[in-house]
Amino acid sequence: METLKEPQASITRLLGQARDGDAAAFDQAYTLIHDQLRRAAHRQLRGRRGDTFSTTVLVNEAWLKLSRADFEARDREHFLAIAARAMRMIVMDHVRRACADKRGGQQVRVTLDSSLAMDQGAEQLLALDEALRRLAEADARLAQVVEWRYFAGLTELEVAGLMGLTERTVRRDWRKARAFLGRELARDDA
């Protein structure tokens, strides 16, 4: 029986081999982490009713994008964080294309609580993406915490390990980031 640490160690080892040029190792790492990628994709797409963009499509597009990219993933958490960013970029590109003719439509207020994406429309996603861009300009670390906590679904402990911070600092950054985004979204809504 595999323990939780064994698959993580396997993924880390395979990512290291992929970094050294072993394409088959990247595919094996993908297989081991596929379920976690699906959960991250589901987080990206939740609440997007009536959209033709599925979790499977998002995972596959992200994998294709990552397989062609030049990046180094240190471990499972780092790979998930990179994959979540790729998925977010893919979703936002999809939303922008879908909204190209709908600029200036009605915007609805978005909040950063546990039900953030429920019934979230394309305009709301664009507003959130713009607020997150402004957060990154103001404080890149806070934006990184949002990406990894919200979009990648990583725990505070996992984010702390990736960023070399304490769990308490990540928790504080998460609160600050949510407050900043809430203000920005409210300002956009006004």
Image: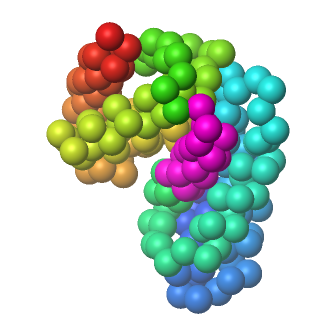
What residue appears at the point 65 percent right and 15 percent down from the top-left corner? 119
Does the magenta portion include 86? yes
Q: Residue furthest left?
A: 138
Does the magenta portion include 110? no
- Report the side of 21 relative to 45 (left or right): left
Residue 13 in sight: no
**Residue 126 in the image, given as x and y percentages of width and height:** 49, 34
- Vertical position of residue 49 compared to residue 98: above or below: above
What residue appears at the point 73 percent right and 81 percent down from the top-left corner? 24
Magenta segment main secondary structure: helix
- Report the side of 137 relative to 22 (left or right): left
What residue appears at the point 53 percent right and 51 percent down from the top-left corner? 89
Check the image and tell me how it is coloured: rainbow
Q: Choose between 50 and 114: the one closer to the eye.
A: 50
Residue 61 in sight: yes
What residue appears at the point 61 percent right and 23 percent down from the top-left corner? 121
- Vertical position of residue 109 compared to residue 168: above or below: above
**Residue 136 in the image, given as x and y percentages of width and height:** 27, 43
How many numbered circles are shown? Answer: 0
**Residue 86 in the image, given as x and y percentages of width and height:** 55, 55
Q: Look at the image and give the residue range highlighted in magenta.
A: 83-102
The answer to which image quadrant residue 36 occupies is top right
The answer to which image quadrant residue 180 occupies is top left
The answer to which image quadrant residue 190 occupies is top left
- Vertical position of residue 106 compared to residue 76: above or below: above
